[in-house]
Each structure stands twice: as structure tokens, then as C-alpha cells.
């Protein structure tokens, strides 16, 4: 009697812990369907539409003056924004992970702020500060500084929205690593700066690269904040995302998608690099946790 | 954390700081190293007043409880670190550094593993690399924080005798922290028993066991 009861319970236990094969297949099908519909299909459409009028038209759309200006501006903004946010992210992560100081929690909250604020609101905030009637507007005008509707405004808005990426990648890792290695370096005679360069940075190099990658992808693809702050001055203050919108609104669909394909290529490259880095970081984390 | 501490260590001595957790022994060790600041008091290394010296200037060899080996560097680079970060003028040549590193690894009986990374080593090996690394800078004093804490009993016992032998060969003034009574008694020339930030008694192992100065010492050693 008891044998049967045990067997019965074991069988039930197995079913309770795992889905049936049917449920598993259904879940996988739903996931693939979702990915196909919302990722693969739109991506494919971008490229199909970009080449819909032939390769010649594709290239022409990219070398058109406004398009070239948009590409140039996007690259310039990325070159300005990514190094600044990397430097800030590294400094903030180092301070937060290795020290206790007054205002630490406030700093952590502040770093997360751009992620919870709508980019449009962020752009608007810059207009309210630096615009002609803004808080610092008269001051900027007096010093001949054009912030909004010009490159500085675009850069500032992009700086704001890409703020957190490097810091958020580094903070948990640096907290987990602790300061023992840095202290060891100090006792061995390294200055604080030397210890930072030779011990701290190499220990976070993959996470740092990953953060820079995310920061760059967002910097190049940002739309909302830049849209508000740039004034859409064609050939001057349009980044690639803005130019795509303009072309699309003028019913120049093929050209719009041609430019958009650049962003799609950036997305694919970012994904590929990201996967490779995750594989690398995974290896690194693995090595660390195997004490 | 630490109350008034008055501690004098003779050159070449091997002293154990013994006590329960929270007694301040690690704090005292870190204060000697300069990793923590004392609110008051003075620290001397022989004739040199070290109170105002920075961590780097004190030239102490510190072995951390977790060894704190540089995970992204090979064993060789770890041991060579103290020499390679010296300013150009004071830095030995590459050949000289290599010679010293290999000599040190030989001294700690770890020949042949220079190319390995810390994660590829056993606990006992890592501990010896940490020791070699600390000794590479020819420190004034060697400070060890629970050197055998993370090792299993058999390795602990082996390394105890080995450490004593190493100390006798190098003659380096050594201070080590432990909560393990038998370890302190077996290894040290003198044992300082700490409790709640104070040194309750300091003396040779035999002396301290035979004549405990305070009730705490008597209880702790029983």
C-alpha cells in the first residue's frame, strides 16, 4: 500500500515541477513569434524599404547634403558625449563603490534620474534653462553662447539622457570587487592614481566597454530630447533620427529608410558586440566567483 | 575601536595579536600599515617616526586575509608589482626584477607557476604568492592578517611550521593577527592578547599560559 502511495506522489511531484512538453512548446512559439513580429520583421522592412528604389537611390540618399550633415552631427555629438559620460561614470562608480560619503545615496538616485524622466521632458528642461526666456537665457546671450537650437544644446540633451549607462554598469561590479586589491597596491608603494590605473580599471574593463557601448548606442539614437532642443534646423541641428523623421514626414519614404538603415546597422553591430562582451564578462565573472 | 595601545616590538621578532572578533587586532594591524588613521598617538619604526608617513612611505609588507592578489595579473606580475610601480629612478631593471621575483617564488616554494593567474591557484599557493609579493619590496615589517584563516586544517598546520621557518631565515620583524590560540602559541616569540581594543597581556607563550594577568586572559586561554 505504502509503495503505491510513494510512487504516486513521485509522479505527481515531477509533473508539478515542470511544464508538460506541450506547454513548453507553446511558450517557445509565443516567444519566437513575439521576437519575429516586433524585432525581426521591422528590421527586415527597414532594409527592404531602404533598397526599394535600388542601390543607386540608397547611396544617393546617404550622400545628400542634409543627410551628410545629419550623419556628421550625430558622430560629433557621440564623440563629445561618450567620453564625458565615461569619465563621469568611472569617477562616480569609483567613489560610490570604494567610499562612504555624505550625499552618496543622493548621487546614486541622481544617476538613475535620466532613466525615469521622459526624454521630451528632459529636452524641454534645457529649453527652459537655456532658451531665450529661460533661466540662463540672458546670460548665455550676453556671452554670445548659442545653446538651444544649436550643437551645444543637442550635446547637452544627449549628455543628460546617456548619463547613467557607464555608471550603472560599473557600480555593482566595483562594489562586489571591494577595495582590498587597491589597498594591497597602496601598501606595495603605488600612489592612489597608479593603483587606480593598474588595478581598479583593468578589473572592470569589460563592464566599462559594455557601458560605453550602451552609452554610444543611445547617444546616436536619441530622438525625444534632441528633437525638442534642436529646433530642427535642417543641415545644422538635425541628427540622423531627426532627419529620418523629416524625410518620412515629407513622404520621401525610401530616403528615410535609407538613413534609418544606418541606425539599424548600428543596432545590429551593438547587439553583436554586446553578445560578445557578455560572453567575455560572463567568463570574467565566472573566474572571479570561483574562489 | 582601539583604546590606548602601548606596544613595542623588537627587530626580528615574531609577534602574534590574539583575541576574539571585534577585539581590534585587525584594526591595530591596519593602523600600523597606515590603512587606517589613529586619532592619537605615535608610531615608530626603529628611529623613524612613522606617524605622519603615508601608506606607501611606510614600506610595510601587508598580507590580507583574502590575499587580495591582483586577479587580472599573472603570479609573476603580482609579485613584481611593488617593484614595477616604483618611479623610474628607483626601479630596478627588468632583468633584476625578474631575478628577484623568481628568487622570492623559490623562497616560498612556488617555482614554475609564474605564468598562472590567481584563480588557477589553490588557497595555500595564493597565500604564499601574497607573502612573496609583500616581501618583494623589502619591507621594514611584515604584517599578516589572519594568514591561515581561509585554509583547511591540514594546510594550516603545514603552513604554520613553514611560516616560522621562513621568518627564521629572513629575520623580518613580523606581526600577525589570529583568533586561533594554538597558532599564536606555536608560532610567536611573544603573544599580545587583545580584548575590546586593549592589550590585556603581552608576553612569551609559556609566560602567558602559565600566568594569565587578567580574568579575560585566563578564560580566553582555557
Image: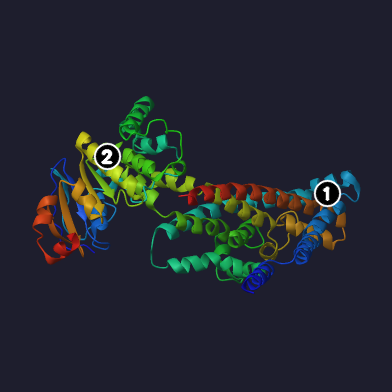
Residue that appears at 29% across and 51% down: B145
Residue B32 appears in the figure = no
Counting from the top left corner in percent of width and height, residue A74 is at 68, 52
Label 1 neighbour load within 10 Å: few <14, some 14-19, many 20+: many
Residue that appears at 88% across and 43% down: A56
Relative side of B69 to A44, left or right:
left
Counting from the top left corner in percent of width and height, residue A253 is at 86, 57
Is B33 in front, or is B51?
B33
Counting labels gives 2
Quarter of the rendering occupied by the N terminus of chain B: bottom left
A79 up-or-down from A153: above or below: above
Is B203 in front, or is A245?
B203
Q: Which mark is residue A209?
A: none
Residue that appears at 27% across and 63% down: B22
Relative side of A257 to B128, left or right:
right
Counting from the top left corner in percent of width and height, residue A88 is at 50, 55
Label 2 residue SS: helix
Say which quarter of the image contains residue A155: bottom right
A246 up-or-down from A82: above or below: below
Label 2 neighbour load within 10 Å: few <14, some 14-19, many 20+: some
Q: Which residue is mark 2?
A: B162
Between tags 2 and 1, which lies in front?
2
Residue at the extreme top of the image, as rendered: B95
Q: Which mark is residue A61?
A: 1
Residue A150 appears in the figure = yes
User: Badge 1 sits on which subunit?
Assistant: A
Amino acid at each position: 500500500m505504502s509503495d503505491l502511495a510513494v510512487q504516486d506522489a513521485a509522479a505527481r511531484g515531477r509533473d508539478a515541477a515542470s511544464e508538460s512538453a506541450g506547454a513548453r512548446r507553446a511558450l517557445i512559439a509565443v516567444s519566437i513569434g513575439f521576437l519575429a513580429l516586433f524585432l525581426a520583421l521591422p528590421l527586415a522592412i527597414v532594409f527592404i524599404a531602404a533598397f526599394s528604389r535600388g542601390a543607386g537611390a540608397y547611396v544617393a540618399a546617404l550622400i545628400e547634403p542634409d543627410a551628410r550633415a545629419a550623419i556628421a552631427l550625430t558622430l560629433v555629438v557621440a564623440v563629445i558625449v561618450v567620453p564625458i559620460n565615461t569619465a563621469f561614470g568611472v569617477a562616480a562608480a569609483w567613489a560610490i563603490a570604494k567610499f562612504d560619503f555624505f550625499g552618496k545615496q543622493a548621487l546614486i538616485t541622481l544617476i538613475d534620474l535620466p532613466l525615469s524622466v521622459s526624454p521630451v521632458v528632459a529636452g524641454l528642461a534645457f529649453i527652459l534653462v537655456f532658451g531665450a526666456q529661460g533661466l540662463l537665457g540672458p546670460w548665455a546671450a550676453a556671452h554670445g553662447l548659442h545653446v538651444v537650437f544649436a550643437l551645444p544644446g543637442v550635446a547637452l540633451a544627449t549628455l543628460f539622457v546617456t548619463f547613467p549607462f557607464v555608471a550603472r554598469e560599473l557600480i555593482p561590479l566595483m562594489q562586489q570587487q571591494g577595495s582590498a586589491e587597491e589597498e594591497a597596491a597602496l601598501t606595495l608603494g603605488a600612489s592612489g592614481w597608479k593603483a587606480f590605473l593598474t588595478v581598479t580599471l583593468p578589473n572592470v574593463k569589460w563592464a566599462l566597454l559594455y557601458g560605453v557601448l550602451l552609452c554610444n548606442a543611445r547617444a546616436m539614437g536619441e530622438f525625444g530630447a534632441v528633437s525638442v532642443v534642436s529646433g530642427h534646423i535642417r543641415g545644422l541641428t538635425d541628427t540622423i533620427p531627426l532627419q529620418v523623421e523629416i524625410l518620412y514626414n515629407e513622404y520621401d519614404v525610401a530616403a528615410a529608410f535609407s538613413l534609418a538603415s544606418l541606425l539599424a546597422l548600428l543596432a545590429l553591430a551593438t547587439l553583436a558586440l554586446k553578445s560578445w562582451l557578455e560572453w567575455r564578462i560572463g567568463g570574467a565573472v565566472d573566474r572571479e566567483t570561483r574562489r | 575601536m582601539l583604546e590606548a595601545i602601548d606596544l613595542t616590538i623588537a627587530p626580528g621578532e615574531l609577534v602574534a595579536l590574539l583575541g576574539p572578533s571585534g577585539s581590534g587586532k585587525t584594526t591595530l594591524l591596519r593602523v600600523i600599515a597606515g590603512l587606517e588613521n589613529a586619532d592619537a598617538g605615535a608610531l615608530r619604526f626603529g628611529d623613524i617616526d612613522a606617524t605622519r608617513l603615508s601608506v606607501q612611505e611606510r614600506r610595510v609588507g601587508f598580507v590580507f586575509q583574502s590575499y587580495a592578489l591582483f586577479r587580472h595579473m599573472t603570479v609573476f606580475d603580482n609579485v613584481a608589482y611593488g617593484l614595477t610601480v616604483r618611479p623610474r629612478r628607483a626601479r630596478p631593471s627588468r632583468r633584476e626584477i625578474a631575478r628577484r621575483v623568481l628568487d622570492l617564488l623559490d623562497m616560498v616554494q612556488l617555482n614554475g607557476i609564474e605564468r598562472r593567474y590567481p584563480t588557477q591557484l589553490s588557497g595555500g599557493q595564493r597565500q604564499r604568492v601574497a607573502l612573496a609579493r609583500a616581501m618583494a619590496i623589502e619591507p621594514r615589517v611584515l604584517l599578516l592578517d589572519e594568514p591561515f584563516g581561509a585554509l583547511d586544517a591540514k594546510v594550516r598546520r603545514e603552513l604554520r611550521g613553514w611560516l616560522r621557518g621562513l621568518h627564521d631565515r629572513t629575520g623580518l620583524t613580523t606581526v600577525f593577527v589570529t583568533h586561533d590560540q594554538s597558532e599564536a602559541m606555536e608560532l610567536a616569540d611573544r603573544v599580545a592578547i587583545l580584548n575590546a581594543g586593549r592589550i590585556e597581556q603581552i608576553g612569551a607563550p609559556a609566560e602567558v599560559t602559565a600566568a594569565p594577568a587578567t580574568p579575560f586572559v585566563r578564560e580566553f586561554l582555557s
